[in-house]
């Protein structure tokens, strides 16, 4: 791992994700963003970097940059953030299972296994 700069504003990357999802390349965009930040050490808060990533996954760069300011995508990100706060999330990584169980922070595999086993037990019982 060679993570990008700490303390950046990742909101533009989140807004870009909403646009990418709407264009059918959400998963590809997410993978490219994670790779750019965690492996290449790129600043995913920089619009130029995001545009380059968007182009690399097949999006039009100009349309992508326009979408970053679009109210619809901004509102969608705000709604996601509000939902995260509702769940009690205030950091990453975080996983929510069955809209019921929150696993926050980097956890060992055993913790995730316990959550899945608990859910399975509830569905069987």
Image (cartoon, helix red, strand yellow):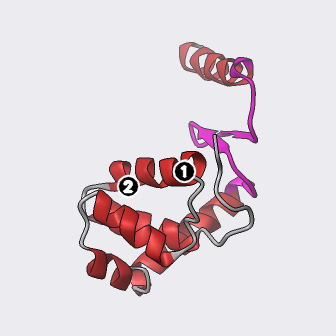
Residue lying at 75% horizontally and 31% vertically, measured from the top left: 107
| Image-based side of 46 in relation to 69, left or right | right
Mark 1: secondary structure: loop
Q: Which residues are magenta?
A: 87-110
Give how far across and how far down residue 11 sits, in percent: 57, 72
Residue lying at 52% horizontally and 74% vertically, measured from the top left: 12
Q: Are marks 1 and 2 in contact (CB under 8 Å)?
A: no
| Image-based side of 18 in relation to 24, left or right | right
In depth, the one of 4 and 84 nearer the eye is 4
Q: Check disc 2: other Cα within 10 Å, few if <14, some if 14-19, many if 20+.
A: many
Q: Which residue is mark 1?
A: 40
Disc 1 from disc 2: Cα separation: 15 Å
In front: mark 1 or mark 2? 1
Residue lying at 38% horizontally and 72% vertically, measured from the top left: 51
Residue lying at 33% horizontally and 76% vertically, measured from the top left: 64
Q: Quadrant of the C terminus?
A: top right
Q: Which mark is residue 29?
A: 2
Give how far across and how far down residue 88 sits, in percent: 75, 55
Determine if residue 18 is in view.
no
Q: Quadrant of the N terminus?
A: top right
Q: Which mark is residue 106?
A: none
Give how far across and how far down residue 55 sits, in percent: 29, 65
Numbered marks: total? 2
Q: Hey, which quadrant is residue 44 in on the image?
A: bottom right
| Image-based side of 56 in relation to 42, left or right | left
Q: Earlier in the sequence, mark 1 or mark 2?
A: 2
In depth, the one of 88 and 6 nearer the eye is 6
Residue 15 belongs to magenta span? no
In depth, the one of 95 and 119 nearer the eye is 95
């Amino acid at each position: 791992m060679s993570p990008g700069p700490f303390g950046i504003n990742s909101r533009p990357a989140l807004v870009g994700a909403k646009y990418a999802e709407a264009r059918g390349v959400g998963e590809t965009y997410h993978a490219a963003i994670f790779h750019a930040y965690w492996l290449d050490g790129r600043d995913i808060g920089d619009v130029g970097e995001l545009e380059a990533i968007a182009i690399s996954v097949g999006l039009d760069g100009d349309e992508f940059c326009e979408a970053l300011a679009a109210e619809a995508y901004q509102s969608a990100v705000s709604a996601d953030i509000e939902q995260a706060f509702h769940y009690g999330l205030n950091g990453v990584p975080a996983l929510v299972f069955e809209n019921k169980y929150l696993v926050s922070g980097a956890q060992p595999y055993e913790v995730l296994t316990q959550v899945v086993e608990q859910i399975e037990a509830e569905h069987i019982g």
